[in-house]
């Protein structure tokens, strides 16, 4: 069994799409084992997207991320990291694959509905920003 971290961004919550997105995730064979609604801090944004710090678009991304509530969650399933990442899709909705969350719901590069962890190392880094966890 593998675990993945995900985050539903403020545009998802403002548009009331969280239930529909969670249904897509569960239909892909993943189980949401923990979730909570949060208001991200600047430090958490930097922790979730450390590779973006200093990029031209970073401040716009931070302001968007701080603009409303988000939902953070942990998904469980076979090959959960790759499965959730594939389901969320490419960050640019204009070229994301059909059937992905971003292709279906995202409107811009910034307002792209969801985030998912990319590997086991970032799973632990991102998850521990929001949850007290131990998996054995």
Image: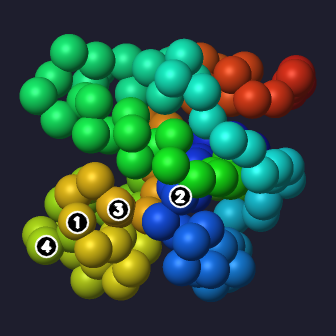
Foreground: 49 or 62?
62
For marks 4 and 2, the one nearer the N-term is 2
What residue is disc 2 on? 10
Identified at 68% across, 29% down, the residue is: 127
Q: Which residue is mark 1?
A: 108
Within-10-Å neighbours for mark 2: few <14, some 14–19, many 20+: many
Residue 72 pos. (x, y %): 68, 47
**Label 2 vs label 3: CA separation?**
10 Å
Circles 3 and 1 in contact, beta carbons < 8 Å: yes
- Placement of 65 over or under 78, stated as above or below: above
* x 58%, y 53%: residue: 68
Q: Earlier in the sequence, mark 4 or mark 1?
A: 4
- The residues tagged by marks 3 and 1 sit, at their Cα atoms, a distance apart of 6 Å
Report the disc number at residue 112. 3
Q: Element under label 1? A: loop
Residue 90 position, x and y percent, is 25, 58
Of labels 2 and 3, earlier in sequence is 2
User: Disc 3 and disc 4: Cα gap in Å?
Assistant: 10 Å
Residue 49 lies in what quarter of the image?
Answer: top left
Quadrant for the N terminus in the image: top right
Task: Indicate left or right for 120 with 119 as reference.
Answer: right
Looking at the rendered structure, which numbered label has been put on residue 94? 4
Q: The residue tagged with tag 4: helix, strand or loop?
A: loop
Horizontal relation, residue 78 to residue 136: left or right: left
């Amino acid at each position: 069994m593998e675990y993945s971290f995900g985050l539903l961004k403020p545009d998802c919550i403002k548009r009331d799409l969280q239930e529909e997105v969670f249904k897509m995730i569960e239909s892909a064979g993943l189980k949401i084992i923990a979730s909570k609604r949060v208001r991200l801090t600047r430090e958490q944004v930097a922790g979730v997207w450390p590779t973006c710090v200093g990029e031209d678009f970073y401040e716009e991304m931070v302001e968007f991320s701080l603009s409303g509530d988000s939902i953070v969650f942990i998904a469980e399933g076979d090959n959960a990291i790759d499965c959730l990442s594939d389901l969320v899709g490419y960050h640019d909705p204009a070229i994301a694959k059909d059937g992905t969350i971003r292709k279906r719901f995202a409107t811009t590069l910034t307002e792209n509905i969801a985030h998912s962890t990319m590997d086991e190392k970032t799973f632990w880094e991102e998850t521990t920003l929001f949850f007290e966890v131990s998996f054995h």
